[in-house]
Image (spheres, rainbow, N blue to C red):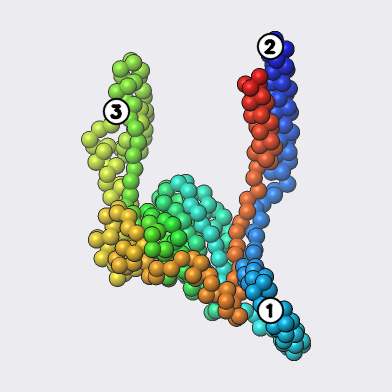
Amino acid sequence: MEFLYEYGLFLAKAVTLIIALVVVMAVIASARQRSQGHDADLEVKDLSASWRLQRDRLLKQMTPAKLLKAQQKQDAKAEKASKGKQLERKRVLYVLDFKGSMDAHEVSALRDEVSAILAVADHEQDEVLVRLESGGGVVHGYGLGASQLERLRRANLPLTVAIDKVAASGGYLMAVVASRIACAPFAYIGSIGVIAQLPNFNKLLRKHDVDYEQHTAGEYKRTLSVFGENTDEGRAKFREELALIHQQFKAHVHRFRPALQIDDVATGEVWSGVEAHQRGLVDDLLTSDDLLQARLAASDWQVLALSRKTPRPLLARLLKPAASLAQRALLAVSRS
């Protein structure tokens, strides 16, 4: 038993040393990477090519050999006949995926994706599809996200937002910018409202004789406090600020969907896709797959998916195997 203890202690020390070395190496490498200015890469995937490949594989399994051979000959003749002819640019459907978190940090990638589209798109024939999923979050983050989508609208690019799961609060703030909104029947839509909440530990601090001081310049620099004593005046001002944001939210929705009875839908409620369609919050009960299929099957369309991939920090990449090693070592010691 003493041997196992000594072995476990040695193993723990070794793992600790390895992790320390990895951290030092990662910090050095990360600093070097920042100095070299590595940026995130914009990835482009040809969904049309992938769809045709899958279709052809399936057809190959379904079609009798003789018929398949005849079809291949026919395709070869058609390809030969088209050689030498000037190829016309196909219409392009640009597909973006936005899965928003509470802090809406994904807007940074969306900004670059929109800029790339505006740089190359044919504004007279191309379109944009955004597959959006978000339950909302910070006002300024989702407000900026809506502004990024509005750049596409101002460029006269038809913009469709597809909601397969949820677009609520800030998610709907972004979705409503689209010229067309489609959602799945059981998706969650709406929550046109504003919420803010915070705890207050002032009573707990007073109970333990802990003083808390807060100094501000400006009458309403801080309306509510987490540690200080809140006043009725501060609460009233805070509610006033929330009401103002709600009014801006309502005006934003009404601007893009003027036919809505805004006071009836801006209650903070969330509806299923079917109910949202009945109330005019969305235009079609379709999934993103339905919308994509229509363009993928059309010979005069090319479907391109854009995504900005931000490389994971080198420190996180190096620490992951070290953490896994430490976990296995601790598990081995505990089993001993």
User: Which residue is outermost to the left?
Assistant: 232
Residue 60: x and y in percent read 68, 74
Q: What residue is drawn where x is 37% and y is 53%? A: 169
Alpha-carbon distance for marks 3 and 1? 80 Å
The answer to whether residue 249 is above or below residue 239 is below
Q: Which numbered mark, 3 or 2, is in the foreground of this view?
A: 2
Q: Nearer the viewer, residue 336 or 317?
A: 336
Q: Amino acid at mark 3?
A: Glu
Q: What residue is drawn where x is 22% and y is 35%? A: 232
Q: Nearer the viewer, residue 204 or 67?
A: 67
Q: Is residue 321 visible?
A: yes
Image mark for residue 327: none
Ranked by sequence position, the earlier of labels 3 and 2 is 2
Image mark for residue 229: 3
Residue that badge 2 annotates? 1
Tell me the element at label 3. loop
Q: In the shown orientation, is residue 121 left or right of residue 149?
A: right
The answer to whether residue 21 is above or below residue 298 is above
Q: Is residue 20 visible?
A: no
Residue that badge 1 annotates? 64
Q: What residue is drawn where x is 60% and y is 81%? A: 300
Residue 233: x and y in percent read 23, 37
Residue 109: x and y in percent read 57, 55
- The total of numbered circles placed on residues is 3
Q: Nearer the viewer, residue 20 or 277?
A: 277
Ranked by sequence position, the earlier of labels 3 and 1 is 1
Q: Quadrant of residue 123?
A: bottom right
